[in-house]
Amino acid sequence: MRFIIKAGMLIPNNTSSDSLPITKIPTIPQPPLNPDFAYNPNIQQLLTGKQLLFDDIPFTFDEIQTHYQNGYVTYRKGIVYKGKQPICARCGNKDPQQFASFPCSRCGETCLYCRHCLMMGRISACTPLLGWNGPVPDTVYPTKILEWQGTLSEGQLVASNHVVEAIRRDQEHLVWAVCGAGKTEVLFAGIEAALTSKKRICIATPRTDVVLELTPRLKAAFPTITVASLYGGSEDRHLYAPLTIATTHQLLRFYQAFDTIILDEVDAFPYTVEESLQYAAIHARKPTAAMIYLTATPNEKWQRECRSGKRAYTTIPARFHRHPLPVPEFVWCGNWQKKLQKNKLPQNAIQWIHNRIKANKQTLIFFPHIPLMEKALPILQQFDPTIQAVHAEDPERKNKVQKMRTKEIPLLLTTTILERGVTFPNIDVAVIGAEDPIFTESALVQIAGRAGRSKDHPDGVVTFFHYGKTDEMIKARRQIVSMNSEGVKRGLLDK
């Protein structure tokens, strides 16, 4: 698409010799709001706080252009330049290898485009990003916003109060809560405070399954509030809502939308390794906005910032049932991979597993890599043929996890795919090959956090079978011991 500037506004024109793709126009003019213009409320709902492509919206170009010329729609460049370096305005990509060119029929030039966020629609040098510049949609709030009737533990209450204060003051705050501490409930008062102040709020998480799990819980807690649930293929894609739950990828569609963003599992893949998702979270918040981070396992940099006073944070060092976290036991098992090549597992690991099967105790066994896990599976199925294995690409993944929940599977072998986001009420946990680099401090803390989560079964055994201790193993155990110690000091544990 090509434009000319006429009477202080962009006018689409593909024939004039002085027309340019939007990226080559130095400054994008924004016409003043025309208060007499009758804007389309459906366009208002769709574009408020968004950055969308023409291809994303079910309105004609002429209608959008009319709204722009009356000041209600904004055009932004899809690709901007810092010197000679192109930057994708949507995802922040600066990597030259993540850009490519194609002969563009819209602008008639060889057009640069961003390959990094291509799955969300092509951003090119002639692509405008559309937003809204008019009044935001009216939202009617009930007198009573929060309907949740539960009570918080002492540790949860302290964190909840700090979240409320950070949201009211538009500040950043980290909630460092142990696995199973009940982080979702800690958010309720903060969400209520934001909605009461007519603030728009978003809970973002790296994984779709967490969005699907949180949505009904939040709809039950806030039954009179419109909740948008956004993930790949979601039917809520065009829904304007005061409360949004989204995968971090979906934040790429937002621009200065939210007064508060709650970022769940801030340590989890892919958020930790994709700079574009971190960029999206920053750009989806308004210039003055609160940012609440949730994690059980902050990285080392954040841990140092917490201890040095550079980062505002609250710890919840104990679970709601007031029992300590299971502390992992380190058990040397020799060169287990060499044994596995001979279709054997270390005898102490076999004995540990056999004891669980004999005691009818459900168990998760973590392996560092799929081929090793699949080689171990037939060995263990000799004890019980119903033992199964699961990994990220397994088409039966959800079915196997459900069977584990209904106790149809006594023992489930898994990769790190089940290190977080799943709860089984009464299990023991083992890691085979805990020395492998894939088992970071964060991963091992999360794995240990699968055990002892239920108030009816607050104890669980966690064993790391290894062929040599690593710093990550030691740091993971130290973090768990430290949380238990803090829980005792603060009177949050019964023993």
Image (tube, helix red, strand yellow):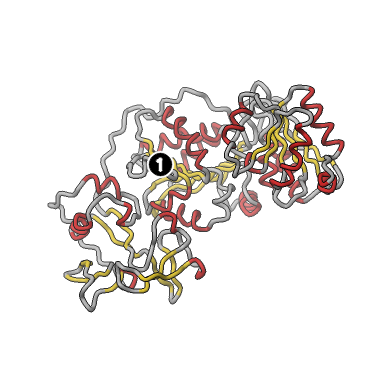
Between 210 and 495, the residue placed more toward the observer is: 210
Q: Is residue 141 left or right of residue 207?
A: left
Residue at point 44%, 40% (across, down): 245
Residue at point 75%, 40% (across, down): 431
Residue located farthest toward the left when viewing the structure as drawn: 36
Above or below residue 16? Residue 317 is above
Q: Residues within 10 Å of mark 1 (few under 14, many from 20)?
A: few
Above or below residue 143? Residue 282 is below
Residue at point 68%, 39% (across, down): 414
Per the image, the residue denoted by label 1 is 234
Residue 360 occupies quadrant? top right
Q: Quadrant of the N terminus?
A: bottom left
What is the x, y in percent for residue 68? 22, 59
What is the x, y in percent for residue 2? 27, 69
- The local secondary structure at tag 1 comes to loop
Between 433 and 471, the residue placed more toward the observer is: 433
Between 362 and 241, the residue placed more toward the observer is: 362
Residue at point 60%, 41% (across, down): 394
Q: Is residue 405 left or right of residue 237?
A: right
Residue 9 occupies quadrant? bottom left
Residue 489 seen in the figure? no
Amino acid type of the residue that numbered disc 1 sits on in the rendered structure: Ser
Q: Is residue 474 left or right of residue 19?
A: right
Q: Quadrant of the C terminus?
A: top right
Residue 159 seen in the figure? yes
